[in-house]
Amino acid sequence: MSEKIMTFEAAMQRLEQIVRAMERGDAPLDDSLKLFQEGTELVRSCARMLDEAQLQIQKVMTAPDGSPVMEDFADEADA
């Protein structure tokens, strides 16, 4: 099965649709299981995208000797 490439925003929107559908509780069990499976795959995909973004969000700093130093991006709450 080929995995669809979906943006983070599109995946989150689809997750919201799945949650609303499951909260209604009117879907047959088989459909609910399929929705749950799709939702868990989307959550994994979103987590992967966030991990990748976090790696890209590193500030490049210059060390006293002029060599580049990578500094991890810190949350504002950590500051």
Image (spheres, helix red, strand yellow):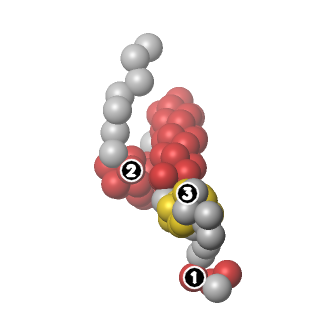
**Residue at 35%, 28% in the rendered image:** 4
Quadrant in which residue 75 is drawn: bottom right
Check disc 2 and report the residue beneath it. Answer: 8
Residue 1 at x, y = what percent? Answer: 44, 14
Residue 4 visible at all: yes
Residue 21 visible at all: no
Hey, what amino acid is under mark 2? Phe
SS at circle 2:
helix
Q: From the viewer's perspective, is residue 1 above or below residue 77?
A: above
**Residue at 62%, 64% in the rendered image:** 65
Q: From the viewer's perspective, is residue 23 above or below residue 18?
A: below
Please tell me whether mark 1 or mark 3 is closer to you in this view.
3
**Residue at 55%, 57% in the rendered image:** 68
**Residue at the extreme front of the image, as rendered:** 65
Hey, what amino acid is under mark 3? Pro
Please tell me whether mark 1 or mark 2 is closer to you in this view.
1
Residue 53 relative to residue 7: left or right: right
Query: How far separated are the C-alphas under marks 1 and 3?
Result: 23 Å
Check disc 3 and report the residue beneath it. Answer: 68
